[in-house]
Structures are given as structure tokens and as C-alpha cells.
Amino acid sequence: MAKGPDIGLRQGRKLCQMQHEGRLAFVAEGLPILLASAQGYQDAASRLNGKPREEGVLVSFADEEAAKILILMDLVRCPPAQVNQHIGKLMRWFYNHLARLVYAKATSWKPMSVQQLQHYLETECEEHSLEGFAGEFILPGGPVHERESALYADIQSYDNGELAWHEPQIRPSLFGPKESDALRLANAMQRLGMLSLDGLRIIASVWSGTLFSGDQTPHVAKALMQTTLEQMEAAGLIPDSAEDGDVITLYERWQLPMYELQITPTVQTLKELREAQGWMLNDEIGGW
């Protein structure tokens, strides 16, 4: 079969072909576009009063668009010697629902090391969970299931093989649509001047000497954040639009770099899940 021209959307992999400075300039050009896209979904969600499912879907879209910014920022933070090793994976994550949703959720995690962060990722990506007394129910889970169960009406199967219709629903919130944490972080970065080309140059320079792998801790990351902000302030790059809470948001929400980690579905077979049910039942009975 003839192959058509390699043009159109989903061309992020071609960032691999760019030199460092050209890549930074191209990323800087795109970050405001991604931010505006994410903010558009969040603003639309705030106008859907009384439509909690649709509000939740739009906030999820905002999460994913803002997560693209965080993925690109990990590319900027990656040491030059490791960029060629990780850029292909990062750009696959840029287009992957699971990776984007995980990046968004990771803004609220507090791991004590990169190694513990990998454990958090594996737990978050579990595709099934055991619920009820002694894990009697096997239920689908994970960020992609959560996303699709809100988006689509569909035919589902229970663990006993019975089929049923799934009706997409989200529990209403008394306070309106949730604000995307990933978007909140991206907006803070924007107001602090970090998404500009000069800001990216400073981030790349400050973070390039540290490889985040294994037992690297948040203390190291926070020290690098401080150095980044100090250099940006010295260069006059932090605009007057920066708000008092933006630095706090940066320190609380910008997760450890994840370029060395793996984001893949954590899959257990039905046999393994049944065995886990047996262990949980034995634990319950043994405790009586």
C-alpha cells in the first residue's frame, strides 16, 4: 500500500531532529497555544451550570492539554546527555491519554524520591482494583477508564461475564466544576515568565546538571526551583502579572522530573486477581 506524505497533525516526534536552541524556541512558541487551549476548556466548563458530566469531561480535557505543557517542561529539564534517550518517549507521552492524565494527577502527589514516584505511577496505572468485603468485586480502574466512563455510553462486562449498559455519569459538585490542577500550575508558570524562551533557557541551564533518577528527592528539585526563580528575577524575566500564590503553586505542584520513569498500564490477569481475592479473604477470616 502506498504511503502518503508525512504531514498534518501528530508530528511531535520530529522534535528529535531539532538542535537544542531551535527546539527551545519551537517549544516556547507552542506553550501559549497549549495554555490557551487548556484554559478554553476550563472556561467552558464553568459555563455548564447543572451539567456535571459535561463539566467534568471539559475539565479532563483541560487537564490533558495542560499536561502537555508539563511533559514539554520535562523535556526542557532533561540533561542534554540524556535528551536523545528520552525525547522519543516524552513525545509519545505527549499524545498518550494515560501519560497526560497521570502527569495531571501527579501535580498533587508528594513522593519522597524518584523511586517512590515510580511506585505511585504503577499504582495509578492499575487497570483493575478489588473492592468490597475481602475484595469480592473486580472493578475496572485507572485514569483512562475514568476518562472513558465519563465520555461514553457503552456495553460493559462484570467479572462474572454478565453484560450491562454503562451510562456515563459524574456526581454533581456543590461548588461547580473542579479546577484543573495541571492548568493552575501552568498558569502560575506563565505568570512567573517561565514559559517564555528566555525562561526556558534558564530552566534548561539550571536543571541540566542534575539527572533525576532513583533516590533523587524533592529537596533537590526545590533547590533548583529556587535557583531558577533567582536567575529569572535577576534577568528581569518575572513580570508584574505574577501573583503572590504563584511561587507556592510552583513549589507544591511541579512534580519531580519523570523522564527517567515508565508510564504504562499495570495489568493483572483474571487468574492473578482471583488469587489476590483469595489472599484478601484469608486475611479477613484470619483476623476474626
Image (tube, rainbow, N blue to C red):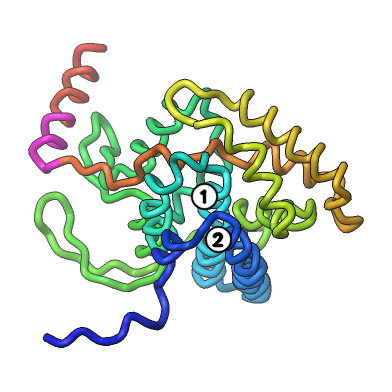
Which amino acid, mark 2? Arg
| Residue 127, percent from left and from top | 27, 47
Q: Decide if residue 94 is on the left or right side of residue 141.
A: right
Considering depth in this image, is 177 or 50 the residue closer to the camera? 177
Which residue is located at x 51 percent, y 58 percent? 19
Residue that carries the numbered disc 2 in the rendered image: 23
The circle drawn on residue 180 is: none
Residue 68 left/right relative to 87: right
Q: Secondary structure at mark 2?
A: helix
The three-letter code of the residue at mark 1 reads Leu
Q: Pointers 2 and 1 in contact (CB under 8 A)? A: yes
Residue 104 percent coordinates (x, y): 52, 51
Residue 107 seen in the current view: yes
Q: Residue at x 49, y 67 (%)?
A: 57
Residue on which the image places disc 1: 75
Q: Is residue 118 magenta?
A: no
Q: Where in the figure is residue 221, as x and y percent of width and height?
A: 62, 31
How busy is the neighbourhood of tag 2: few (under 14 within 10 Å), some, or many (20 plus)?
some
- Mark 1 falls on what kind of element? helix
Kindly report the secondary structure that dominates the magenta region of the rendered protein.
Answer: helix
Query: Alpha-carbon distance for marks 2 and 1?
Result: 10 Å
Looking at the image, which residue sits at the far top?
A: 287
Residue 213 falls in image quadrant:
top left
- First to last magenta residue range: 269-276
> Nearer the viewer's eye, disc 2 or disc 1?
2
The quarter in which the C terminus is drawn is top left
Give x and y (percent) for residue 28. Answer: 64, 63
Task: Establish if 102 lies above or below 122.
Answer: below
Vertical position of residue 74 compared to residue 273: above or below: below
* Residue 42 shows in the view: no
Closer to the camera, 2 or 182?
A: 2
Quarter of the image for residue 167 reads bottom left
